Image (tube, rainbow, N blue to C red):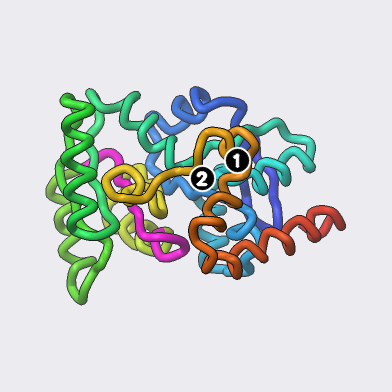
Amino acid sequence: MNHKIINNYKINAFESKEKFLQEIAETKAILVAMNAEKIIKNDEKLRSIVNNNIGYPDGIGAVLALRHKGVKAIKIAGSEFWLDIIKRFKKEKKFYLIGSTEQVIKSTVKRLKREYPEIQIVGYQNGFLKKGDKERLEQSLQKSKPDIVFVAQGSPRQEFLMNDLMKKYPALYMGLGGSFDIYGGDKKRAPRLFLKLELEWFYRLLKEPTRLGRQLSLVKFIFHMGTNRL
């Protein structure tokens, strides 16, 4: 995999989703979606997880940073790519889902089974873990033996959880943020026009003004990239 170091994060560049799917077919690692907000973080625990696994350009900021370093890369939206993984491996891999509310995770599982009748979902758990739940989750993974585990809790909480679970049960893990809420809940992705113009971040800001503080990190990121500080 071609990669570059950006703000001491190793980010892998992919020319297509197909090549990404080929790379992870037999891999046991954590897939970490990288965007401007995450790249600008100086979080050594998160940085260690990314650098020891597979960080990929989920946001346009990460794509631009890679291109700025002279590497060809496309944006791979995790909110879509997890379904590409299911479509490719639904007949040969076993899946486990963790995240969101009990209602949303059940709706997500129900919809997946309806749309992909061949899929093998060997377990699921909502993302609101209480005391002792992580240990029970580890035991459930060891017993059900999934090949792929999707974790939708938000970053960096999901990365920290996946890292802990990986130590007890190696598999292919992927962090999904709010993807279950979109697929099995009430939230909607940005309209196609916003996606085409790479303005999904702006659409999400319009829908959720409280995200303004997070989006300010994009300004900081652009400044650092423009002054070659990444």
The structure residue drawn at horizontal position 18% and vertical position 73%, both measured from the top left corner, is 132
With 226 as the anchor, is 186 left or right in this view? left
**Element carrying mark 2:** strand
Front residue of this view, candidates 202 and 177: 202
Q: Is residue 102 left or right of residue 155?
A: left
Span colored in magenta: 146-158
**Residue at x-position 80% and y-position 60%:** 223
Q: Quadrant of residue 99?
A: bottom left
Answer few, some or many: residues within 10 Å of disc 1's Cα (few below 14, many 20 plus, some between 14 and 19): many
Where in the figure is residue 172, as x and y percent of width and height?
Answer: 36, 42
- Checking the image for residue 103, the label placed there is none
Query: Residue 62 vs residue 101: left or right?
Result: right
For disc 2, the marked residue is 54
Helix, strand or loop at disc 1? strand
Numbered mark located on residue 12 in the image: 1
Q: Nearer the viewer, residue 167 or 210?
A: 210
Q: Are marks 1 and 2 in contact (CB under 8 Å)?
A: yes
* Label 2 environment density (alpha carbons within 10 Å; few <14, some 14–19, many ≥20): many
Marks 1 and 2, Cα distance to the nearest angstrom?
7 Å
Residue 156, x across and y down, in percent: 46, 64
Q: Quadrant of the N terminus?
A: top right
Task: Pick whichever of labels 1 and 2 is earlier in the sequence.
Answer: 1
Q: Residue at x 84, y 53 (%)?
A: 226
Query: Can residue 138 be seen in the rendering of this structure?
Result: no
Is 43 left or right of 8, judged from the image as shown?
left
Is residue 54 highlighted in magenta?
A: no
